[in-house]
Amino acid sequence: MKVLLIQPPIEDFYDTSIRTYPLALLYLATKIQALADVSILDFRTGRKPKVLRHHPFPELEPYYREGVSTPLSFFARYYRFGCDYKEMKKEIAAREPDVVAVSSLFTTYSLEALEVARCAKEVNPEIVTVMGGTHPTLFPEHVLKSPCVDYVVRGEGETPFFRLIAALKEGRGAAIGDIDGVCRKTGSDLRISDIHVEDSIDLIPDRRLVNPADYRIGKKNYTFFLTSRGCPFHCAFCGRPPVPYRRRSLASIEQEIRQCLDANIQALDFEDDMLTLDPGYFRQMLKLFHGTGLTLSAMNGIYAGGMDTATLDDMFTAGFRRLNFSLVDLSRSVTERQKRPCGTDFLSLLPFLESSPFLTEVHFIIGLPDQKPEEVINTIIFLMGKRVLLGPSLFYLAPNSAIFSRMVGETWEPNIKSMRSSAMVPADPDFPRKSLYTLVKLVRFVNLVKNVIDQEDGLGTAGDLLNDQRFGRNPHDQEVIRVLLAEKKLVYYDRKHGGFLPEPHDPELLKLFFQQARGIMIRGFKTMNTLTIG
Ligand code: B12
Ligand code: SF4
């Protein structure tokens, strides 16, 4: 039996192309390896993005434009990241699979995943199609009602998928209805199973099933890695898959590290939802990396609760160089409202981090319901004075989160495309889109200044930026910054018509930022160099 596991393409204004390792598919492929002839096809990674002239967000046209020159640029074009329909059909047809199984991790890109199932059925209606991942787990009916999907797997897929493939192979179709985690249909009758949770999460994915050179960060082959699954917390904005928190055995992690090295992996990104929950376990786990030479990261974000400087030292020894912390917001009242545990524990680690060799990125959310733009300004001003890079995340509605249930509940379907940060959907009328946009632009300004002062010390105030070579080379960029500093306005240079035009922005917020930031210092990201906002 030939089983093809597919990572679908996505359509958006951007892609995080350094983080598309198809780990879920590798777990599934490894589990059924002895049962079937299995291969993985990644329709998303390593393909040239294609510009889509029409996109589903006409309301964003004033914000994301082409032909614009500004040093504070944001998104411009809408793309398809990965294969188009014709290529997908050709690739599926060439492999003549019996089963096509598609990963659908994101609700917002679930239509792209369904397209893959449609391709498979068009290639050959006899191909059995299966879909799994966070989206089908949360909305099995939505996926199963597509005439192109035969089965949906809910929850962790290894065992249900194994049983499904075994039943199909042995022609035991009738038994499929009883497999925990597998949903099926008979005519219009849908049989929806509970969410499956694996008894053991120690399975080691066989990374030889993908080409390591297809997944690179800089010059290094990277992989995703999990030491745990699930998270015991319930932040109101989070749409994590509803599975309990469990940790892996250290012995299996040790074995997996060896296999990664054998597979020529040089960098490893932990994608755990809660990597550092138990600092004791975490530190033991870090010891397994000593001497491996692997570069470690946790770009999904590190939770600082319970962490201390000794743990940070251990992280450095293990191979971490760049840290991504999830702050959410500086204000305790915001984090408490969001039910975010230990929201501000990170602050106690900051003095150590600033004087350490780590490069630290701090992520915070812009546009949470009940969050005020002024609160975000406080976070920005605080972080700009620290030796960190600012990592803004625009709020989006995450299915299964408490906010999602409150705001859209059962009526979510028409909003599918908006459940992404690039859609900049305001969650609160007091925090409109132009304020979200203004704050992102301010963060870009701060990070740009950090970049400039990292390269050049002794710039006294922000006004000196205008004489800096970096801006001097492009008079249009220089003018955009001059207008921002002097007139507190956002403008861009329109290359087509050859003039400066206003960007949508909230002038009051800009004024407030510069008022509060007056006399306050911006510190570099890589260096302790500073500059003062005049
Ligand atoms: C890595 C990751 C990414 C990567 C991409 C990963 C990839 N391969 O494409 C990056 C960083 C690019 C990413 C981006 C986004 N992400 Co993300 N991401 C994750 C993260 C942290 C881990 C996913 C993972 O690999 N887990 C490890 C694997 C082993 O677990 P798994 O995926 O659950 O797979 C198991 C089952 O689901 C099932 N299964 C999975 N696939 C299949 C397929 C079949 C056929 C079967 C049978 C079973 C099956 O079996 C697997 C093994 O048990 C999850 C959080 C999470 N806990 O899932 C969020 C998550 C998936 N992301 C999410 C979102 C919303 C986004 C964004 C759209 C947010 C935004 N900024 O707009 C962005 C898109 C940005 C962009 N355009 O680049 C949400 C999705 C929620 C939803 N219902 O839509 C999640 C759940 C985060 C959250 N807490 O809310 N993400
Ligand atoms: S945001 Fe992080 S800590 Fe909060 S529930 Fe989600 S995974 Fe857990």
Image (tube, rainbow, N blue to C red):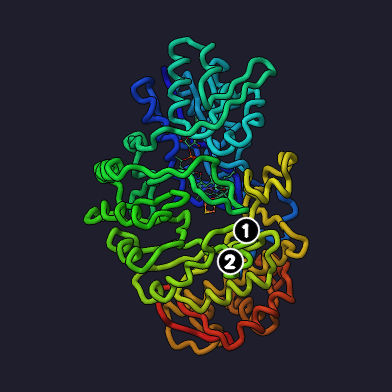
Residue occupied by mark 1:
338
**Residue name at image x 33 percent, y 61 percent:** 315
Alpha carbon distance from label 1 to label 2: 10 Å
Q: Is residue 316 left or right of residue 84?
A: left
Q: Which mark is residue 306?
A: none
The answer to whether marks 1 and 2 mark residues whose Cβ atoms lie closer than 8 Å is yes
Figure quadrant of residue 201: top left
Work out whether 491 lies above or below 97.
below
Mark 2 highlights which residue? 329
Identify whether 398 is placed above or below 330. Answer: above
Residue at 61% x, 78% y: name it.
481
Left or right: where 367 falls relative to 44:
right
Query: Which of the two discs, 1 and 2, labels the residue nearer the N terminus?
Result: 2
Task: Name above or below for residue 453 compared with residue 12.
Answer: below
At numbered mark 1, what does the secondary structure look like: helix, strand or loop?
A: loop
- For image coordinates 45% across by 51% down, the residue present is 274
Answer with left or right where residue 151 lies relative to residue 33.
Answer: right
Horizontal side, residue 227 vs residue 506: left or right: left
Q: Which residue lies most toward the left here?
A: 291
Residue 355, image x and y in percent? 37, 76
